[in-house]
Image (cartoon, rainbow, N blue to C red):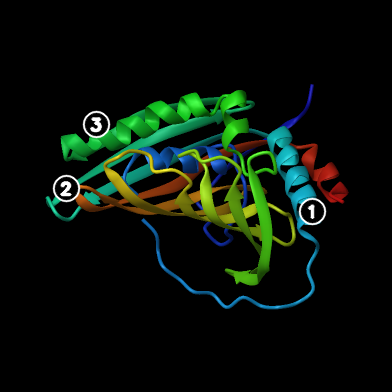
Amino acid sequence: MSSASLVTVDDDSSAPRGSDILCKGSFLSLCLLAFAGMVHSAPVVQKEAAPSVDEILVRMKYHDEWQQRYLLEYRAQRKFHATNLRFNEDATLEVMTTFRRPYTLESYVLRAEGSKLIRERVFNKILEAETEIESGAARQQVDIVPENYTFSYIGIEDCAGRKCYTLGITPRRKEKYLIEGQIWVDAEDWGIVRIHGYPAKRPSFWTRKIEIDRRYKRVAGMWLSDSTESISDILVAGPSTLHIQYSYEAVQTDTTMDRLSSTNP
């Protein structure tokens, strides 16, 4: 039986991150069910020596497998806030979410207020869909891996003090849960730090455009979701925004990872 370590977390936003259980491709895809936003930025891309795309992908795969093996459980409070400016509607939802390895995800509502329409059509749809998409088979269809995407090298950037490799991602299929855009990969541990892009296929006739920006941070040695910002242009309703913020209360890991983490090739 493996030993485990439970860390009580004062939310640490000092480092952005890579791929975690409650998203990477998976949870990001769920935001396409709602209206969504993005904080525009134009970082300088540095030109210097870097590993090949194939090498980056191999190391990303190793990191994902490592985290899936050693992340046992976490508990996080999430705050959803959505706004539609044209109709002056907004709503807030706070939920407590618990993840248990391998694919168990449970959420319960702590507080809900504001527009009933937004809560029913946006927040509830996300909560319903994310449990379904966290199953092993569903995750394989949306994960950011060569089976679902082609990759191209763009450059090297600074991500809040950490060196990152920027890759372009192009879906192999026109599906609404796949993203056309870019990812930022941490140069030290090879996790995905950031995902930005647009759905490969419009989620519905009513949604004309969606732009999504998702960030990660390091918590108790694991890279987990930090925030999601999105904005969408919806027929009749116009621009609508969504923000989701994560605050981790506890993260449980297999303590043997301390002995094995140095074996990353």
Query: Disc 3, disc 2: CB below 8 Å?
Result: no
Earlier sequence position, callout 3 versus callout 2: 3
Q: Distance between the residues labelled 3 and 2?
A: 18 Å
Q: Under tag 2, what secondary structure?
A: loop
Q: Does 18 sit above or below residue 139?
A: below
Amino acid at pointer 3: Glu
Name the residue: 26% across, 33% down.
121
Which residue occupies the extreme left position in the image?
87
Q: Distance between the residues labelled 1 and 2?
A: 44 Å
The quarter holding residue 205 reads top left
Q: Distance between the residues labelled 3 and 1?
A: 43 Å
Earlier sequence position, callout 1 versus callout 2: 1
- Which numbered mark, 3 or 1, is in the foreground of this view? 1
Q: Residues within 10 Å of mark 3 (few under 14, many from 20)?
A: few
Left or right: residue 99 compared with residue 262: left
Amino acid at pointer 1: Asp
Point out the image quarter for the N terminus: top right
The quarter holding residue 155 reads bottom right
Amino acid at pointer 2: Val
Q: Under tag 1, what secondary structure?
A: helix
Q: Mark 2 points at which residue?
A: 236
Name the residue: 26% across, 42% down.
206
- In front of the other: 263 or 29: 29
Q: Name the residue under label 3.
A: 120
Q: Name the residue under label 1.
A: 54
Which residue occupies the extreme top position in the image?
1
Q: How crowded is mark 2: few (under 14 residues within 10 Å), some or many (20 or more)?
A: few
